[in-house]
Amino acid sequence: MNRVRLLVLNAALGPLDYTVPERMPIEPGSVVIAPLGPRKVTGIVWDNGRLPGAQVDASKLRPILEVVDVPPLSQPLRRLIEWTAEYYCAALASVARMVLSSGGALGGPMTTTEYRLSGGTPERMTPQRAAAIDALEGEQGIIRELAAIAGVSEGVLRGLVNQGVIEPVTVAIDRPYPAADPDFHQPALSDDQLEVANRLVKKVQAQDYAPVLLDGVTGSGKTETYFEPVAEAIRLGRQVLVLLPEIALTENFLVRFEKRFGTPPVLWHSSLKSTERRRAWRAISNGTAQVIVGARSALFLPYANLGLIVVDEAHEVSFKQDDGVRYNARDVSVMRARFESIPVILASATPALESLHMASTGTYELMELPSRFGGAQLPEIKLVNLTDEKPASGRWLSAPIIRALELRLEKGEQSLLFLNRRGYAPLTLCRNCGHRFQCPNCSAWLVEHRLSARLACHHCGLETQVPDACPDCGESDCLVACGPGVERIADEVGELFPEARVAVATSDTLGNPERAAAFIAQAEAKAIDVIVGTQLVTKGFHFPDLTLVGVVDADLGLEGGDLRAAERTYQQVAQVAGRAGRGSKPGEVLIQTRHPDAPVIAALANGDRDAFYAAETEARRDAGAPPFGRWAAIILSSEDEKEARAAAARLGDTRPDRDDLYILGPAPAPLALLRGRYRYRFLVNARRSANLQATLREWLDAHNFPPGVRVGVDIDPYSF
Ligand code: ADP
Ligand code: ZN
């Protein structure tokens, strides 16, 4: 009798054994439905002998009920699921769920009903209906999605359906995507680009594991260069995955992709409509989707014949997932390429130190684009020492930046001011009693957002109205904003230059693809003079008339508990500086700082990347930090402070005593309260040679924590 072990999509259960009914077509990777008591569970048939499980007597096993109509998960994907769970100390089921539930892949009909305007008019036109009809022009989707687009309740739209103004349409889930043409428009590449492109194309032809670090300065034309191996993969009938760090960047990418290949790629991100998501998932798994452009979660999709992975802006922090399975998509992409035996290209102008280290040791192949495309010069970088050049009281821009802005406005060129702080002011307090507005769910201040007239917590999403009076002392008109956010800088620019057209560019204002596209179009049409933005504008954008970049506070990132603070500061400032002077006009970068002598700031000013990386490498070596040693964090949290503290203390009592591991804590985590949960943290610093994961697992598995306590393991954490 045929007996199989399933990886079931329920982390509490562990692998379970079943029998296979006669003639049921099952192989490793098959997705199946099986009985569990009175319920049903979804599971993946796993390779024999690779999952531990209880030895249940064969006579007690129940048969699998049915096979789900999706292709079996490939062997490389099964190995990736195992590796991810093992490496990040996560449950196999949690990783498998990222693969299967991500697309609503399981079950469901093969067609869906969507809705769109019929062209008819309602019996009674109200302003609300008129606005809804206006907003829905050209849109199609399910009622909930349309309601979100139109900004009305679902009830309003149902009313319009009943009147025939909105009509149902049946669409096939599996309608094909248009085919990309690898030879649609081949741009003339520079000699440097051509040389690198040819080397990359050879990697694709070889179809072997080959990790490549594509290290090219900002504006060197990395995208056009890696489009050549993408084209080659398409010619060979292989799929390509391009990971982008930020949905706001996708728009620019799509335009360039369509120019090169004649059709847009298949998109994968969290704000995809449910039907689009299902369509993409199925096309990816049956091989008809050719090029997939996505956020980090696209890494866990069931590609039928993946031939190349590109990770653009590979140094970006947003490739790190910070809840659930805490993985770093950059590292996982290299592992996926290894299991699939394909090349992977990590592209960046400011690679992570770890990636450079891999290149210097020969683990990754280094390919370089040392100069800007089309002869554009890298911008000139100058420091503004805030100790000498004090901004006016209650202001944040120094005289040199103001003069430089004025000059750009006179010449009709664009400027970009960078400050990595959303909102108007990071802290609001009462002038009368000193009350500070704090989030009730998090140890964080509420940030004033003047554009939306709200106080918001940037950690849990809580939003409240700005009150008229202080909730503590009752005094009115007493609230003071402390410190700058981008909105406040935008106000300052507006007051200095009332004629200037100023745009705030953050995830609040460009958070969805439509808004991002509108912003790019405006900036390209030169309807914006000054952009004030957060890290969102540091990369990807290419505005040829942008000639000034001002960094409002370069010291900001050096504060706080970030293991890679210096590296992060270097990357952000170098990236945002890279937005200047990308066309024929030279660019200028002014960096405001109180610490002009800090090594990272000095390296930026001298344009001496090698010096910065060399110094940072030594600092990491001394600290036993990556890539020389390893870090992990363990976070215990509970809604009950005492419970969290007690659990952490108990765990601390059994800490492993080993020469190759050093354990700090428990101590309150940097965000000691987050989303209503109290958090205690251990930091583990391990030698490279230590078996970190196995040790952590053994340590944690020996404990039975109360149900209210959650334990999270973060391997290679970013922020401390
Ligand atoms: P990077 O990503 O390296 O910062 P980009 O790929 O954004 O640089 O390229 C910078 C600019 O140069 C873009 O506008 C791009 O379209 C243009 N460009 C790059 N290579 C070529 C080429 N071979 N032909 C025409 N334009 C190019
Ligand atoms: Zn909060």
Image: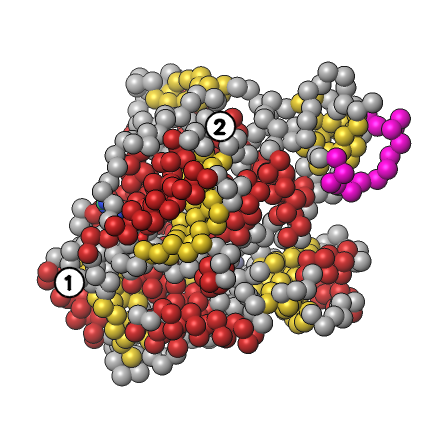
Residue 80's place in the image compared with 659, above or below, is above
Q: Position of residue 395 (x, y in %)?
A: 28, 73
At 62% across and 28% down in the image, what residue appears? 72
Q: Nearer the viewer, residue 625 or 134?
A: 625
Kindly report the secondary structure that dominates the magenta region of the rendered protein.
loop
Q: Is residue 625 magenta?
A: no
Q: Amino acid at mark 1?
A: Arg
Residue 182, visible in the rendered structure: yes
Residue 94's place in the image compared with 354, above or below, is above
Q: Check mark 1 vs ligand 1: CB closer than 8 Å? yes or no.
A: no
Quadrant housing residue 586: bottom left
Left or right: 336 as drawn, with respect to 161 = right
Left or right: 186 as drawn, with respect to 713 = left
Residue 417, visible in the rendered structure: no
Residue 442's place in the image compared with 483, above or below, is above
Determine contact: label 2, label 1, CB under 8 Å: no
Left or right: 712 as drawn, with respect to 623 = right
Q: Amino acid at mark 2?
A: Gly
Alpha carbon of mark 2 to alpha carbon of mark 1: how far?
50 Å
Q: Residues within 10 Å of mark 1 (few under 14, many from 20)?
A: some
Identify the magenta region. Answer: 48-62
Q: Nearer the viewer, residue 636 or 124?
A: 636
Q: Which residue is mark 1?
A: 408
Q: Position of residue 225 (x, y in %)?
A: 32, 46
At 24% across and 49% down in the image, what residue appears? 190
Q: Which residue is mark 2?
A: 287
